[in-house]
Amino acid sequence: MFDTALSAADLIFLAKGAGMTIVVTAISVTIGTLLGILFGVIRVQLGAVLATPLTFFLDIFRSVPLLIQLVLANAFMGMVLRLQLSGFTIACMVLSLYTAAYCTEIVRSGIDAVPATTRRAARSLGMSWLQDMRHIVMPLATRVALPSWIGLALGVMKDSALVYVVQVTELLKSTQILITRLQEPLFLLMICGAFYFLISFPLARFGGYLEKRWSND
């Protein structure tokens, strides 16, 4: 018969870790998406050559492993800038820029997918650039970019497990603490995986619902 030392208090502890994962992910994805939209539009408007400095900056966050980014950001803020920022703040900052780096490419590819003839037709009807972007480009680009953005959001949620290096007790860190105390790694990791599934499944299904609905419009 299966026996475990896991208590209700331990499950609550894991739930709090899952809550921290959700908060870090929500903040990072929200800020990163807003920055990604801004940077994506800038890249399209400036062109490949003029946007080279911005592209290079974002490439750093796409190329350097997230774990290294978190460690370097924590050291830079504390040792170089002498700023006493919490691990939570540093985690959200790094994850937001990490999200923005990938979201920029998603937005750029979505805008590029809008036919040039459609945009020219909108401008010929007297629409301003802002009206063209708001009423024509963004609605069409969103349909193209949504599946990739959903995948990015889910990826950021899973990557948030690395924020333990800046002393943020999220879901995986909470699980590691219990493993050290209870010595039941397989069982606790299964519970951890179940928590991740419960967090990510609604977002994945909602994205699938929107994609299916828009494809039928």
Image: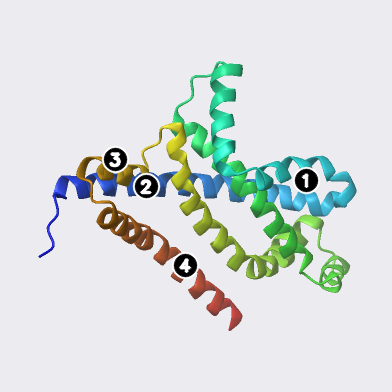
Crowd rating for badge 3 (residues with CA inside 10 Å; few <14, some 14–19, many 20+): some
Q: Nearer the viewer, mark 2 or mark 1?
A: 2
Q: Is residue 197 left or right of residue 163?
A: left
Vertical comparison of 72 with 209: above or below:
above
Residue matched to label 2: 172
Residue matched to label 4: 204
The three-letter amino acid code for the residue at tag 2 is Leu
Q: Nearer the viewer, mark 2 or mark 4?
A: 2
Q: How far, Cα to Cα, is label 2 from label 4?
A: 21 Å
Residue, x 63% and y 47% (percent of image)? Answer: 100
Crowd rating for badge 2 (residues with CA inside 10 Å; few <14, some 14–19, many 20+): many
Crowd rating for badge 1 (residues with CA inside 10 Å; few <14, some 14–19, many 20+): some
Q: Position of residue 157 (x, y in %)?
A: 47, 52
Q: Is residue 111 left or right of residue 82?
A: right
Residue matched to label 3: 177
Residue matched to label 1: 55
